[in-house]
Amino acid sequence: EIVLTQSPGTLSLSPGERATLSCRASQSVSSSYLAWYQQKPGQAPRLLIYGASSRATGIPDRFSGSGSGTDFTLTISRLEPEDFAVYYCQQYGSSPSTFGPGTKVDIK
Amino acid sequence: QVQLVESGGGVVQPGRSLRLSCAASGFTFSSYGMHWVRQAPGKGLEWVAVIWYDGSNKYYADSVKGRFTISRDNSKNTLYLQMNSLRAEDTAVYYCARDLWELSREYSSPFYYWGQGTLVTVSS
């Protein structure tokens, strides 16, 4: 099973700042089958990025993904008030699909 | 529009059974693989099971293998999760989620569409 590690655990930033979230895999993620989700309290997760760098339908271009192999990054170029949430990465290239533990982005 | 609506959650004693349902609408249900994903209170996400669009293959997380069974009725546009021998650690919100791509024969997928979730509490 591929174990995903996310860092930092919590990121405290102000609106307008840039957020950089990391997801590291215990082994290479095949074909960059890596996705990112945003989750707010009481809501289902929202798909942001799949295939490491492809934005899902309706996702603003301030969200971008990069990386390959074992190291992946989600970047939010300028934080909007609605971006403060928990972010999860998921690998779906190997069975079982696994999620990272999450990074909480909160308001500084 | 795509809708996934889970039902069947509740409070159940350890060792007992529960069946969850997920009613799908707004898309051709029989063309998409379907998954269950759970989230324990205050914790992260855990993939539970997948069933391919035609029901030909099913895969499970090790934590539920042998106790949970995923199934689907394409004539009723409904996904199920039969949960037996429930344990306290199965307490979670259970979400159904749809494959991103139709007619997929992969173990997993990114999940664009999710239900609102149904809470299962295993407690004596």
Image (cartoon, grey):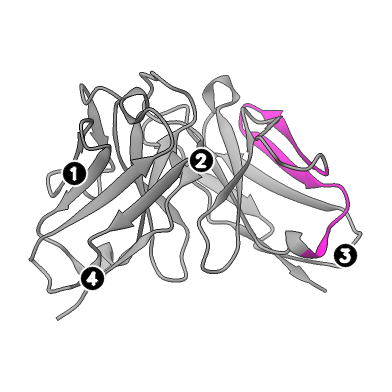
Q: In whole angstroms, how far apart are the C-alphas of marks 2 and 3?
A: 32 Å
Can residue B53 be found in the magenta stretch?
no
Mark toward the viewer: 1 or 2: 2
Say what amino acid the circle numbered 4 marks: Gly
**Which residue is located at x 49 percent, y 46 percent?**
A99
User: Between tags 2 and 3, which lies in front?
Assistant: 2
Left or right, residue A8 beside residue B75 = right
Residue that mark 2 sits on: B1
Single out the mark in the foreground, 2 or 4: 2
Report helix, strand or loop for mark 3: loop
- Percent coordinates x, y for residue A29 in the rendering: 54, 28
- The CA span between labels 1 and 2 is 33 Å
- Residue corresponding to mark 4: B10
Mark 2 surroundings: few (<14), some (14-19) or many (≥20) residues within 10 A: few
Q: Mark 1 lies on which chain?
A: B
Which of labels 3 and 1 is toward the front? 3
Amino acid at circle 3: Pro
Residue at the spot of label 3: A15
Instruction: Report the chain holding disc 4.
Output: B
Q: What stretch is highlighted in magenta?
A: A62-81
Can you identify the residue that label 1 sits on? Answer: B65
